[in-house]
Image (spheres, grey):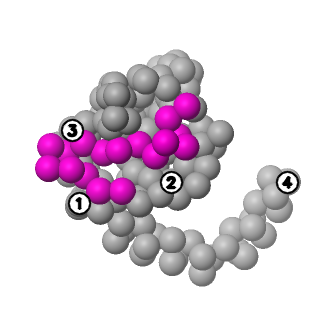
Amino acid sequence: MLVGEYRHVLDVKKRLAVPAKFRKDLGNRVVLTRGLDACLFLYPERSWIELADRLGKLPTGQAGTRSFVRLMLAGAAEAEVDRLGRILVPEYLRAYATLGRKVVLAGLFNRVEIWDETLWREYQKKSEQNASEIAEKLGEIGAY
């Protein structure tokens, strides 16, 4: 299970070390794509295939659906985890997430989010301020 929060740095060759705790669940082949809220999503290959299959079957008649599918699928990059546990983060994805040298990898059960450390702190602060309100809404739909 992919859970936890880890701080790492992009090396000079723009490689990112995947936390050892995540490597077993991610496997050797992963997919990195544009995420939401200015972060990147990192999926194990098997989870990505399931998600891509669902996205590929969505109707194309609505502009919002088309845009989201394009964001996720066209923006994806396959990567191999090297023997030292690193992945290469393509430039277009680094630019999308405005990744600086310091990043945070946050495990979210079936994926890992990769954030610029400063953006993560800002996002986390806002989320913590709204946690009770979010829990209330989730309770209304029976999710919490």
Provide the residue span drawn in magenta.
8-24
Residue annotated with mark 1: 101
For the residues labelled 3 and 1, the Cα–Cα distance comes to 14 Å
Identify whether 93 is placed above or below 61: below
Q: Residues within 10 Å of mark 2 (few under 14, many from 20)?
A: many
What's under tag 2, amino acid-wise? Ala
Q: Which callout, 3 or 2, points at the residue further toward the start of the chain?
A: 3
Please state which of residues 117 and 92 is positioned toward the viewer in this rendering. Answer: 117
Residue plotted at (72% across, 76% down): 132
For the residues labelled 3 and 2, the Cα–Cα distance comes to 19 Å
Identify whether 135 is placed above or below 99: below
Q: Which callout, 3 or 1, points at the residue further toward the start of the chain?
A: 3
Residue plotted at (15% across, 43% down): 13
Residue annotated with mark 2: 106
What's under tag 4, amino acid-wise? Gly
Tell me if 119 is positioned left or right of 10 in this view. Answer: right
Residue 53 appears in view: yes
Between circles 4 and 2, the one closer to the viewer is: 2
What's under tag 1, amino acid-wise? Arg
Residue annotated with mark 4: 142
Residue annotated with mark 3: 90
For the residues labelled 2 and 1, the Cα–Cα distance comes to 16 Å
